[in-house]
Amino acid sequence: MSDAAGDASETALDLHRSIGVLLFSYGRRTEAEGVLDALHEDMCVLLGGDHEETREIADLLARLHCPEGPDPY
């Protein structure tokens, strides 16, 4: 893999992350989930499941799946 291909991959990951977060912030949860699910799969392959950025996306997906969060009572 050349440096240019590596840069393109990083750029694509960043772009997908931005799109997913924007969709989420506009309340378009289903679309955000689709983008972020695909991003998470790509990140697992490219960076590994234990990579910090991969875990951040997994945490965001968990919030999408459980929007209310834990019951405070």
Image (cartoon, helix red, strand yellow):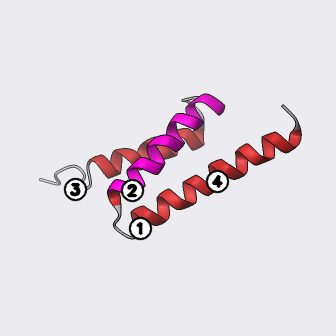
Report if residue 35 lies within the magenta region: yes
Left or right of residue 55, residue 30 in this image: left
Frontmost of labels 2 and 4 is 2
Measured as percent of width and height from the top left, residue 45 is found at 60, 29
Alpha carbon separation for disc pair 3 and 1: 15 Å
Q: Main secondary structure of the magenta part?
A: helix
Measured as percent of width and height from the top left, residue 38 is found at 49, 41
Q: Please tell me whether residue 32 is drawn above or below residue 51 in the rendered image.
A: below
Q: Amino acid at mark 4?
A: Asp
Measured as percent of width and height from the top left, residue 15 is found at 62, 57
Q: Which mark is residue 31?
A: 2
How many numbered tags mark residues here?
4
Where disc 4 sits, the SS reads helix
Q: Are marks 1 and 4 in contact (CB under 8 Å)?
A: no
Frontmost of labels 3 and 4 is 4
Q: Please tell me whether residue 11 is drawn above or below residue 58 in the rendered image.
A: below
Alpha carbon separation for disc pair 1 and 4: 16 Å
The outermost residue toward the bottom is 26
Where disc 3 sits, the SS reads loop
Alpha carbon separation for disc pair 2 and 4: 17 Å
Q: Amino acid at mark 1?
A: Ser
Q: Which residue is mark 4?
A: 14
**Highlighted magenta segment, given as a residue range:** 30-47
The residue under the point 39% across, 56% down is 31
Q: Amino acid at mark 3?
A: Glu
